[in-house]
């Protein structure tokens, strides 16, 4: 039994392979503007300031924790409930009772420095069959609560 494949059959595979390689290269891209030397200031803002004065602050999401260093994370949430070392990274776990949720933070080295940063954050419900909102879980776990919106003057 002999199979015959024309040259045109490989073209879609090459296009797919090229697009896949471009997507993987984009995943490894580093943000510009970082000198990489010296200490960076702690950026603890999980709730950005409103763009308009009459707008309430946005609630924090698990994506807001990504790229935080170990020091920034400890300043926000304190010591983790459990810490699991999985070289070259670590997994930090935080638990809340109201709502009953778990925050998992995955730390890996920030190339080229050996400093660990959060590469992924995941919020899970601790109640079987239920989901939990990222914002509710993060708000419950924050050591310092986000600033409340200033009331408008009634004049």
Image (tube, rainbow, N blue to C red):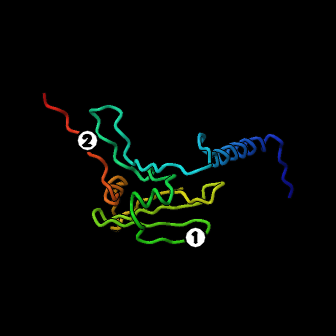
Residue 121 vertical position relative to residue 30 in the rendered view, above or below: below
Q: Is residue 27 left or right of residue 121?
A: right
Q: Which mark is residue 86?
A: 1
Question: Which residue is at 29% across, 67% downward?
Answer: 97
Q: Which of the 4 image quarters holds residue 35?
A: top right
Question: Which residue is at 35% across, 39% downward?
Answer: 49
Question: Which quarter of the figure is the C terminus placed in?
Answer: top left
Q: Is residue 51 left or right of residue 88?
A: left
Element marked by disc 2: loop
Question: Which quarter of the figure is the N terminus placed in?
Answer: bottom right
Element marked by disc 1: strand
Q: Which residue is situated farthest in the right direction here?
A: 2
Question: Which residue is at 59% across, 40% downward?
Answer: 33
All told, the count of numbered labels is: 2
Q: Position of residue 119 (x, y in %)?
A: 54, 56
Residue beneath disc 2: 149
Q: Which of the 4 image quarters holds residue 114?
A: bottom right
**Dot 2, how many residues are within 10 Å of its Cα: few (below 14), some (14-19), or many (20+)?**
few
Q: Position of residue 36 (x, y in %)?
A: 62, 48
Q: Is residue 54 left or right of residue 153?
A: right
Q: Position of residue 69 (x, y in %)?
A: 51, 56
Q: Position of residue 76 (x, y in %)?
A: 39, 57
Q: Nearer the viewer, residue 96 or 18?
A: 96
Q: Which residue is situated farthest in the front direction here?
A: 38
Question: Which residue is at 29% across, 35% downward?
Answer: 55
**Dot 1, how many residues are within 10 Å of its Cα: few (below 14), some (14-19), or many (20+)?**
few
Mark 2 vs mark 1: in front: 2
Q: Which mark is residue 43?
A: none
Q: Nearer the viewer, residue 107 or 61?
A: 107
Residue 29 vertical position relative to residue 127 in the rendered view, above or below: above
Q: Is residue 63 left or right of residue 143?
A: right
Q: CA distance from mark 2 to mark 1?
A: 41 Å
């Amino acid at each position: 039994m002999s199979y015959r494949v024309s040259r045109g059959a490989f073209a879609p595979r090459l296009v797919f392979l090229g697009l896949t390689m471009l997507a993987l290269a984009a995943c490894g891209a580093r943000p510009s503007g970082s000198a990489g030397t010296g200490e960076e200031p702690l950026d603890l803002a999980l709730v950005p300031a409103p763009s308009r004065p009459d707008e309430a602050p946005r609630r924090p999401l698990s994506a807001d924790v990504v790229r935080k260093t170990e020091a920034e994370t400890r300043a926000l949430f304190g010591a983790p409930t459990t810490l699991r070392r999985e070289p070259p990274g670590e997994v930090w776990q935080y638990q809340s009772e109201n709502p009953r949720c778990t925050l998992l933070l995955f730390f890996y080295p920030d190339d080229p420095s050996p400093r660990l940063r959060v590469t992924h954050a995941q919020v899970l419900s601790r109640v079987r069959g239920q989901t939990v909102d990222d914002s509710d879980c993060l708000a419950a776990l924050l050591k310092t609560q986000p600033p409340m919106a200033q009331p408008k003057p009634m004049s």
